[in-house]
Image (spheres, rainbow, N blue to C red):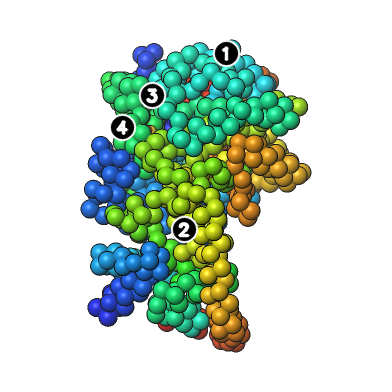
Amino acid sequence: MSENADARLEREGRVFGRYLLGREAGAAVGARYAAAHGTLDWGEGRGWFERLLLAAAARHPLATRACDAYSRFLCPNSLLRRKLILLLAILELTPPFYREIDAAGPASAPKLAALIAWKGLTMAALLLPALVVLLPLQAASRVLAGRRPSGAGRV
Amino acid sequence: MSDVTVVGSGASGVHFALSLLRKGYAVTMLDVGFAGPPAVNPDDTLNGLKENLADPVEYFLGRRFEALILPDAGKEYYGFPPSKNHVFRVPPPFTERSTGFEPLFSFARGGLAEAWTGGAYPFNDAELAAYPFGYEDLAPYYDLVAERIGILGADDDLARFYPRHRHLLPPLELDEHSTLLLANYHEKREHIQGALSCHVGRSRLAVLSRDLDRRRACDYSGRCLWGCPSGSLYTPSLTLEECLAFPGFTYVPNMLVTHFRYAAGRAIEAVCALDLERGTPCDFPVRRLVLAAGTLSTAKIFLQSIQQGSGRAPVLAGLMDNRQVLVPFITLALAGQPFDPETYQYHQLAMGIVGTDPREYVHGQITTLKTALMHPIIESMPLDLKTSLFLGRSLHAALGVANINFPDRRRPGNTVAIEPGADPAHACLRIRYAPPPGEGRILRALIRRVKRILWKLGAVVPPGMLHVRPMGASVHYAGTIPMARERAELGASEGCRSHDFPNLHFVDGTCFPFLPAKNLTLTLMANAARVADREF
Ligand SMILES: Cc1cc2nc3c(=O)[nH]c(=O)nc-3n(C[C@H](O)[C@H](O)[C@H](O)COP(=O)(O)OP(=O)(O)OC[C@H]3O[C@@H](n4cnc5c(N)ncnc54)[C@H](O)[C@@H]3O)c2cc1C
Ligand code: SF4
């Protein structure tokens, strides 16, 4: 993989790490994430909508969350979801992050319920604008893909 | 030439061979026998591996990330770990085409049970009703196998379903989650047993709670799925090691047996194999042949032999497998609690659900998910990953899965045949399976009951996460050449001797005429030992 591509993937990994953990996951995790792309053949160029979703998600952890929420419901097998799951799997096996992932959440039931409700609400708040922006784009990409000869849209 | 030639080193083959070797026979075992890697850092716990390995990601997920579970994985909650890749590796000349069935094959040294979860349950008289013998006949061999491999369990409410063989080891310490579920069961036992016809108790497991020869008692390392480094969780390659200590034993790996050759009187003269290292065919003259290649592979060798010998292409009917339904659950009282990852990883509790006919007994195994990789579970939640991760962390100690197994019967439409290919020595195995009519109704009713049972145990089943596994996924294959007292073409005697070839025996699931819901491997091993004792 080229130096440029590696640097882009490490940057992407850093933003996604901040999204999942709320803090930097560090250079080693970024490098592991980038290196994994040398082995996995996910077809980086899966069509312009998926590329756009990925590029938007890689800009800032808040954007990652909005695009991820959208993707979970409307594009569950997207390149973005795959990359996020890959990073999550790397984190759950790497010290010290696995300890954070294994650490229990709040023990008190009301606190847990309140936090879940809060997280659900923030997800919904981010999902709404994502729907407004991304849904028409995804629909357009489908229509355009339908008009192209098969194989088009791949890089 | 050895007295007896055995094909396959799985649970069936090794226990058959060991019994014969102890009787003084000379035994040759032909096997593909792919071997696994040695255990890494044997003294580390699960988290110790994450801390101490140079690249834990490669160890747990594989060089090509083959154990990464992505959204299109079909609701399986774990992938086979890279350390078990050899167990499911298929040699290239072996081909199969299936309809309604997703088979797994093993060509490993030790077979499929190198990756099993150790559930070891004897069949009772009701479950053996279709067999030409009863529990009393099999009991000495259950005792023998239990002594050889180490089986633990308890005399509890499940004893009414599981006959008590000898040499039962005391159970392991329960993890906190299983302790809570069992305590809730005891509190509501009357209702659960009465209104829901369900009994809950300790699993019977082929795991050591005491040292046995060179194998150590379970030290709760939590590494079971990735391969037990201390030999506490039994695998057949341990028995193969025992066989190898006998001077009369010859083990020939790298041999893919394709068929056998027989004379005019149908006596088998030689076994034909492909040497996988050299790519050349070889013949092994035989006196008595025993097929233990696993039900499906044995069927292929048998059918291909008939086709090569006579040009006929018969069909074997009656293939069986247990339908399995995975019911994930959350034990509410454990939400937000910490958990101890240093526990035995697989199921420690089992449930028996009865109907009016004892053969329709439904068998459940309850696994608490303390050491499972979390990304498949987190990914499957209907939320963004950040929220799912928070939920997953909060619920980790509370997560469990009940694996519900249903019995199966021989039905004429479920068949195994071969389709001649370009190379006559390597025909394609053709499997067809359809579930019994009305299965959906039975599953739905039972799932409703399981949800109520889990509720009584203090757990809820989250919506949308239940998974009816495809047929073939339980890997409990049986029934293609059934044993019976009456003679029949494509059948076998009470002693699992072929009715078609006088010097051929089958000692894997091939001859089982009925498949109870309970996992069959302990009975495979006991029956193999019975055949070795009674027929040789
Ligand atoms: C994940 C998993 C979990 C399981 N859990 C349980 C459980 O908890 N309890 C339970 O009872 N069962 C369980 N099982 C099922 C159990 O593993 C099988 O029932 C058992 O392994 C069958 O043993 P076998 O010897 O009959 O055949 P196999 O295990 O299939 O062994 C076949 C042997 O024959 C050899 N062979 C095959 N074809 C050829 C050929 N053509 N030429 C030469 N050699 C050949 C192979 O190399 C292998 O050594 C589980 C299986 C899996 C995969
Ligand atoms: S059986 Fe499992 S928990 Fe016990 S020692 Fe082996 S790997 Fe560790």
**Residue occupying the point 51% across, 47% down:** B335
Determine which quarter of the picture holds residue A28. bottom left
**Residue occupying the point 39% across, 31% down:** B233
Q: Is residue B122 left or right of residue B79?
A: right
**Contact, mark 1 vs mark 3 (Cβ under 8 Å):** no
Counting from the top left corner in percent of width and height, residue A114 is at 54, 59
Specify few, some or many for label 4: CA neighbours under 10 Å numbering under 14, 14-19, or 20 or more.
some
Find disc 2 in the rendering and name its residue: B390
Look at discs 3 and 4 and give the one toward the viewer: 3
Q: Is residue B496 above or below residue A62?
A: above
Q: Is residue B313 left or right of residue A79?
A: right
Counting from the top left corner in percent of width and height, residue B26 is at 35, 20
**Residue occupying the point 44% across, 75% down:** A62
| First in sequence: mark 2 vs mark 3 | 3
Find disc 3 in the rendering and name its residue: B209
Residue B192, can we see it?
A: yes
As measured in the structure, the alpha-carbon distance from the residue carrying label 3 to the one carrying label 4 is: 12 Å
What's under tag 4, amino acid-wise? Ser
| First in sequence: mark 2 vs mark 4 | 4
